Amino acid sequence: MIVVGQRPIVGRSAWRRVSLAPTLALALALALAACGAQGQSAKPTPTPTPPVGPAATVVYRGHSGPVIGVAWSPDGKRVATCGNDDTVQLWDAATGKQIWTYHDPVNPGNTYLFALAWSPDGASLAVGGFDLSVRILDAATGHQRTILAGTTNFIEGLVWSPDGKRLAWGGGDGSVEVWDVVAQKLLLTYNGQTAAIGHLAWSPGGAQIASASYDGSVQVWDATTG
């Protein structure tokens, strides 16, 4: 500091120190406040605990491999299953008691069963898989009634017509076949898709079939003419 006529003259560096002090103090206060706000917003949000449902009412055990197909009976009293152990098994839906087991009599242990479907009246079960055929089983006993054979690829999608007179199934080559169950003959083949058919659904009135394919499409077509 230089004194001239008893009046202090503040040097440039000293002036800077004096004038910047309030500014620095304010900036520091604002920074601390901002950090506090960020610290509050960074607190983790508690993850809600998902609700836990009750344990399964009934557990069916009996397959020795993966279970691929499952279907309720029309009256809701039985559950049918099939899988890679080449069996079809029927269970009491209320108790879990096994009613019967069907084993492939032609090629036991080597027939993967992918799809099954109940007839509308609950009297029959249709089962299809890797052996290029569909078996019709008596739902009461598990005995094989007949085999519908002639398809050229494995069967994954399977459905009965609403009147129970026809069966439609989808092959691994993208085709769908519609068969007369009583006459045991092929009625028509639909070739509108280019990859395996995963699922089929028959319209309630019986006039149309919807086929879902691994090619990414669902196609609806006339069940009588294809």
Image (cartoon, grey):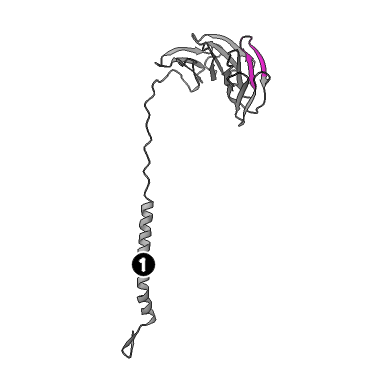
Name the residue beneath numbered marker 1: 26
Q: Position of residue 83 (x, y in %)?
A: 50, 20
Q: Residues within 10 Å of mark 1 (few under 14, many from 20)?
A: few
Residue 58 falls left or right of residue 148: left
Q: Residue at x 63, y 11 (%)?
A: 184
In the rendered image, residue 154, in percent from the top left (x then y), is placed at 60, 21
Image position of 178 with respect to 29: above or below: above
Residue 133 included in the magenta stretch of the image: no
Q: Look at the image and tell me in which quarter the C terminus lies.
A: top right
Work out whether 8 lies above or below 189: below
Can residue 182 be seen here? The reply is: yes
Q: Report the front residue among 141 and 130.
A: 141
Q: Closer to the camera, 104 or 157?
A: 157
Picture quadrant where residue 178 is located: top right
Give the residue drawn at x 37%, y 31%: 52
Residue 182 placed where, x, y %?
A: 61, 9
Residue drawn at the location 38% of the way across and 52% of the way down: 41
Residue stretch rendered in magenta on the structure: 175-188
Quadrant placement of the N terminus: bottom left
Q: Is residue 36 left or right of residue 72?
A: left
Q: Residue furthest left?
A: 6
Question: Element at badge 1?
Answer: helix
- Main SS of the magenta part reads strand
- Amino acid at the residue labelled 1: Leu
